[in-house]
Amino acid sequence: MKKIILACLMMLLLLVPVFAGGGKETVAATPAAPVEEVPMTHDELVAAAKAEGKVVVYATTSRIAKAAENFTAKYGIECETSNLKDFELIEKVSKEAESGVVGADFVVAQDAGRLFGELIEPGFLYNYVPPTFKDIIPESQQNPLQICAINKVFIYNDEYTQESPYYNIWQFADPKYKSTLNFKNPFQEGVNSNFLTMITKPEIADEIAAAYKDYFGKDIVLTTPNAGYEWIKAIYENDLISGTSDTTIAENVGMKGQKKENTPVGLFVFSKARYATTKNLALKPAMDMEPFCGFYYSLYALISTNAKHPNAAKLFIEYLLTEEGFEPWGSDCGTYSSNPNIPIQEDIDYPFAVWEPLLVKEDAEWCFDNRAEVEEFLNLYIY
């Protein structure tokens, strides 16, 4: 049904004249035709990109600014970057495309569900995989192209214990662990909402039901559509602490001198585990959790169908897949390039091959088709 609605909206764009104001450059506000790629060697692409002289990027990561600085130093191409929240980026790209305003040449964005349903399917963005990386990047990460994966995991305060006290996600629904779990408000970050949507997928909900039986010693009795919904309901009713940022949650969880029993735990980006050193906090991942110890999502690079500087965009995407271009992310833990030749920070992290089977993965189509129902359910407990 959503796909039909999107198609109808695109047809309406053919019928409604759109006028641009404020002197901004515009293009015809019609559905974009498929982009035909002109084969180029790397040197030809560099020359074409330099001839364009500029590239405009919208991103949901502040690290894009450092990557752009390095890209300009390497190729002499001016970069204009905007760091936006995920919902801001999606709305901005959508509105600009619908009104014919030329904006970003490409985006680096998260929130797979909305990207798929609101920007890729309508034809506002298209996928591009640099030829130099087609035999390097795993096929499963090429459409749409993933720059990297980012994990959010259960992280606890390890000041008094070296072994995790947390081994089953149903502990956070047990009254013995009331007010223990911290999690950023899913309405403030799309990937968090996607995670809660993913655990309502039948095969994951079945795993959650099995974990319930392992923890409580009896079969789950449903009061909601499945065990995924049931866990969401249970953790909120057990006084989940809703935060406004992963940084703040990490600081609250890792602060030293807290109670020894039921140490606080948060579900937040693993990159914050570096605070154990940089901020003298007590933070350690609870990796041996049933049936998962967190989730992961991706940063995607997609080109605007109406890009003014498409070759510079292609060159920048290629650059982000190199070790030099990925340095703003690769110098930290918790981000894993889709280029398997780029090493991780082995002293503070684990290879993504270790993390992947422990985590819930985003499914873009499932999130797009089901997130509204999950968010409607969440409204019962958050507001």
Image (spheres, grey):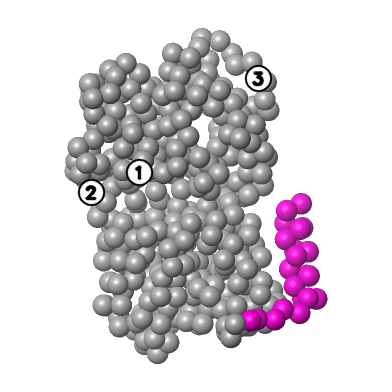
On screen, residue 288 above or below 280: above
Mark drawn on residue 247: 1
Question: Between marks 1 and 3, how big is the CA–CA gap?
Answer: 35 Å
Q: Quadrant of residue 354?
A: top left
Residue 8 x %, y %: 78, 64
Question: Between marks 2 and 3, how big is the CA–CA gap?
Answer: 43 Å
Give the structural element (helix, strand or loop) at label 1. helix
Residue drawn at 58 percent across, 86 percent down: 23
**Three-letter code for the amino acid on which mark 1 is drawn:** Thr
Residue drawn at 63 percent across, 44 percent down: 371
Mark drawn on residue 222: 3
Give the structural element (helix, strand or loop) at label 2. loop
Give the residues drawn in magenta, as a range.
1-21
| Residues under numbered marks 2 and 1 in contact, where contact means CB atoms less than 8 Å apart | no
Depth check, front residue: 267 or 311? 267
Q: Earlier in the sequence, mark 1 or mark 3?
A: 3
Mark drawn on residue 155: none
Q: Is residue 228 visible to us here?
A: no
